[in-house]
Amino acid sequence: MNYFPLSKENNCELNDANKDMEPAAMKWSQGGYYFDSVRGYTVKGGESYIPGIHRCVNRCCNQNPCLNGGVCQEICDNHSPRFNCTCSYKYTGKRCGQTTHPRNCKDIANNGAAESRKYDIFDSANKRFSVYCDLQSEPGFVWALIQSLSIANKAMYKDKGFGTDLPLSYNKNEPDWNSYRLSLSHMQSLSNHATHMRVTCNLPADGLQFTDYARAVLAGHDIFGD
């Protein structure tokens, strides 16, 4: 536990970790004290618990902390987490809260990402491709960049709607905001998991400006049609 006598609450904080499991989190700080309460495990009859021989029961799995159908196993070891989650192939992480094959930028954000940049996601065939995810410009929304162009390059896109396969500069480490477009198959893969489409002007330089902004619901619209 941590005890902070100088804090406003003047209370104790019980930790689910110890200095062996999370050494960086247990570093001393001004006004704080660390107390390591070592648990002892016994079996019926008073014998000492022996890992690998006796069945561990510490009640950590009573309410199943594992998410998305993960299977919880209790661990009676003072130097490790007190439970382990075995996840299905679709999920990963300590509590099975992360998607193994993110399909869109929302999955990327749910996996803990917070920076706007390129990330790897997967199509319906679990083939990897890169997409620029905007995770910061608009609270409540995350966006995948499918196209960007400058006025100087508008002729390249004339009469080439999103139904035309015209991949441009999408395989670079950073998007070319003057001329960028995902392939048709990758745009379609993203649209299968999308709810809205957004159009902005000069986003990388000026940020999100609602004077030049349009947002539409995708339901009932075929952006890849003629």
Image (tube, rainbow, N blue to C red):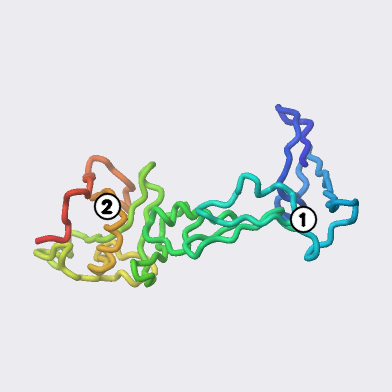
Identity, as a three-letter code, of the amino acid under mark 2: Asn
Q: Residue at x 83, y 49 (%)?
A: 39
User: Along the line of sight, which residue is nearer the eye, 106 or 208?
Assistant: 106
Quadrant location of the C terminus in the rendered image: bottom left
Q: CA distance from mark 1 to mark 2?
A: 56 Å
Q: Which residue is mark 1?
A: 76
- Figure check: 215 above or below 85: above
Q: Position of residue 17 (x, y in %)?
A: 72, 50
Q: How many marks?
A: 2
Q: Position of residue 159 (x, y in %)?
A: 9, 64
Quadrant location of the N terminus in the rendered image: top right
User: Along the line of sight, which residue is nearer the eye, 172 or 106?
Assistant: 106
Identity, as a three-letter code, of the amino acid under mark 1: Cys
Tell me which numbered mark, 1 or 2, is placed earlier along the sequence: 1
- Seen as rendered, the residue at the extreme front is 45
Q: Secondary structure at mark 2?
A: loop
Where on the picture, by quarter, is residue 132?
A: bottom left
Label 1–label 2 contact, CB within 8 A: no
- Figure check: 166 above or below 78: below
Q: Residue at x 28, y 43 (%)?
A: 209
- Figure check: 12 above or below 74: above
Q: Position of residue 100 (x, y in %)?
A: 47, 63
Where on the picture, by quarter, is residue 172?
A: bottom left
Q: Residue at x 34, y 72 (%)?
A: 171
Answer few, some or many: residues within 10 Å of disc 2's Cα (few below 14, many 20 plus, some between 14 and 19).
some
Label for residue 202? 2
Where on the picture, by quarter, is residue 56?
A: bottom right
Direction from residue 178 to residue 120 in the image, left or right: right
Answer few, some or many: residues within 10 Å of disc 1's Cα (few below 14, many 20 plus, some between 14 and 19).
many
